[in-house]
Amino acid sequence: MEGPESGSKKKTVGMAYLKEGQGIYTLRLWTLLEDKFFLLPSKDDSSKYLLMTREPNKSGASKNKYFWNIVGNAKVLTGKNVIELNFDLLEKKIYMSIFPEESATPGGLPALEAA
């Protein structure tokens, strides 16, 4: 996958997967192996997403199973078939293919790439 600028260098920095029937991508970054990130579509704009983490709610009295934390945002780059991921604490942009090639990664999972 190419970055938005021509001639940009690409590196695979993680992977994403989408369970059948769900609308939330789960992301893993190789540099943060212990962490799992989630890409949730915006309710207002289908081209925008929120990048989130979640942690278990340890309160037995709460009806919510998790606390969700916003750690960035994402948007679909029209005509490029990629989502641009913007983590709040990372300077580089990361791109995720919306329609990965079958041979792009083991099992056909979308690769996350930095430009």
Image: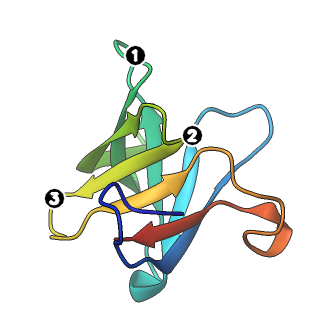
Q: Callout 1, which amino acid?
A: Lys
CA separation, marks 1 and 2? 12 Å
Residue displayed at 34% across by 48% down: 51
Question: Of label 3 and label 1, which has the lower sequence position?
Answer: 1
- Tag 3 secondary structure: loop
**Residue 6: % across, % down:** 34, 62
The reply to whether discs 1 and 2 touch (Cβ–Cβ < 8 Å) is no
Res. 43 mark: 1
- Image point (49%, 42%), residue name: 80
Measured Cα–Cα span from mark 3 to mark 1: 21 Å
Of the pair 61 and 53, the residue shown nearer to us: 53
Where 64 sits versus 57, above or below?
A: above
Residue at 29% x, 59% y is: 5
**Residue on which the image places disc 3:** 88
For residue 95, side relative to residue 27 (left or right): left
Neighbor class of circle 3 (other Cα within 10 Å; few <14, some 14-19, many 20+) is: few
Mark 3–mark 2 Cα distance, whole angstroms, equals 19 Å
Residue 115: give x, y in percent of width and height: 34, 71
In primary-sequence order, the first of circles 1 and 2 is 2
Judging by the rendered image, the residue that carries numbered circle 2 is 24
- Residue at disc 2, secondary structure: loop
